[in-house]
């Protein structure tokens, strides 16, 4: 199931939260008027949790079947390294599980993240 686990992980926990763009032509998005020169943030992370595209989006479920997300962006600037990124995550998980097959969160702790344009893990305490 490792490929599905990788895909579900990057859907639920995207490290790139948003990318910036400059509006080039006047337009309207969801009732908001945008004019040339305006700056917008494309929230790639949020669309992976869109309840219209994903059933129970907050749940980690690698068995959900089709896993849809925009973690690697969309359009002409879509991530050039997405296949390498998937492979790196897969090898990391495989090697971790080979060496540490049984582990759990340290009692009384929970994972902590810091988020802005990028999302990073600030604290993760495991016990094995
Ligand atoms: C989990 C890891 C990664 C994530 C979540 C990620 C995510 C993204 C996202 C969201 C974009 C689009 C940015 C935009 O639209 O402005 C992007 C672009 C890009 N990524 Fe990644 N990336 C990852 C790993 C990598 C790796 C490993 C490489 C190269 C070895 C890479 C190379 C690039 C390049 C060159 C672009 C720019 C493409 C362009 O503008 O045409 N990325 N990435």
Image (tube, rainbow, N blue to C red):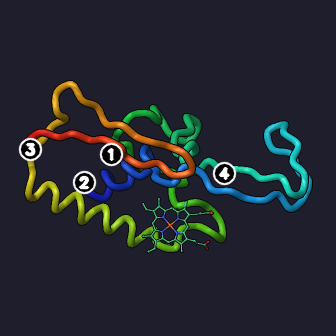
> In the depicted view, which residue is nearer to us: 25 or 59?
25
Q: Position of residue 116 (x, y in %)?
A: 55, 45
Q: Position of residue 84 (x, y in %)?
A: 38, 72
Q: Residue at x 56, y 39 (%)?
A: 50
As measured in the structure, the alpha-carbon distance from the residue carrying label 2 to the one carrying label 1 is: 8 Å
As measured in the structure, the alpha-carbon distance from the residue carrying label 3 to the one carrying label 2 is: 17 Å
> In the depicted view, which residue is nearer to us: 58 or 15?
15
Q: Position of residue 94 (x, y in %)?
A: 19, 60
- Mark 2–mark 1 CB contact (< 8 Å): yes
Q: Which numbered disc, 4 or 3, marks the residue that appears first in the sequence?
A: 4
Q: Residue at x 51, y 54 (%)?
A: 16
Relative placement, left or right, of 88 versus 17 is left
Disc on res. 1: 2
Q: Mark 3 highlights which residue?
A: 102
Q: Is mark 4 within 8 Å of ligand 1?
A: yes
Relative placement, left or right, of 85 versus 99 is right
Q: Is residue 59 above or below residue 24?
A: above
Relative placement, left or right, of 41 versus 78 is right
Disc 4 on helix, strand or loop? strand
As measured in the structure, the alpha-carbon distance from the residue carrying label 4 to the one carrying label 1 is: 26 Å
As measured in the structure, the alpha-carbon distance from the residue carrying label 2 to the one carrying label 4 is: 31 Å
Quadrant position of the C terminus in the picture:
top left
As measured in the structure, the alpha-carbon distance from the residue carrying label 3 to the one carrying label 1 is: 19 Å
Relative placement, left or right, of 75 versus 38 is left
Quadrant position of the N terminus in the picture:
bottom left
Q: Mark 1 highlights which residue?
A: 62
Q: Mark 4 highlights which residue?
A: 42
Q: Residue at x 30, y 51 (%)?
A: 5
Q: Which numbered disc, 4 or 1, marks the residue that appears first in the sequence?
A: 4
Q: Which numbered disc, 2 or 1, marks the residue that appears first in the sequence?
A: 2
């Amino acid at each position: 199931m490792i490929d599905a686990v990788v895909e579900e992980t990057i859907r639920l926990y995207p490290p790139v939260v948003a990318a910036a763009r400059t509006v080039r032509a006047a337009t309207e998005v969801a009732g908001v008027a945008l004019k040339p020169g305006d700056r917008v943030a494309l929230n790639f992370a949020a669309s992976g949790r869109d309840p219209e595209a994903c059933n129970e989006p907050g749940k980690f479920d690698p068995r959900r079947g089709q896993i849809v997300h925009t973690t690697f962006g969309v359009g002409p600037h879509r991530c050039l390294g997405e296949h390498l990124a998937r492979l790196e995550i897969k090898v990391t998980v495989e090697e971790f599980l080979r060496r540490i097959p049984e582990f759990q969160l340290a009692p009384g702790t929970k994972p902590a993240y810091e988020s802005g344009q990028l999302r990073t893990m600030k604290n993760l305490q495991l016990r094995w």
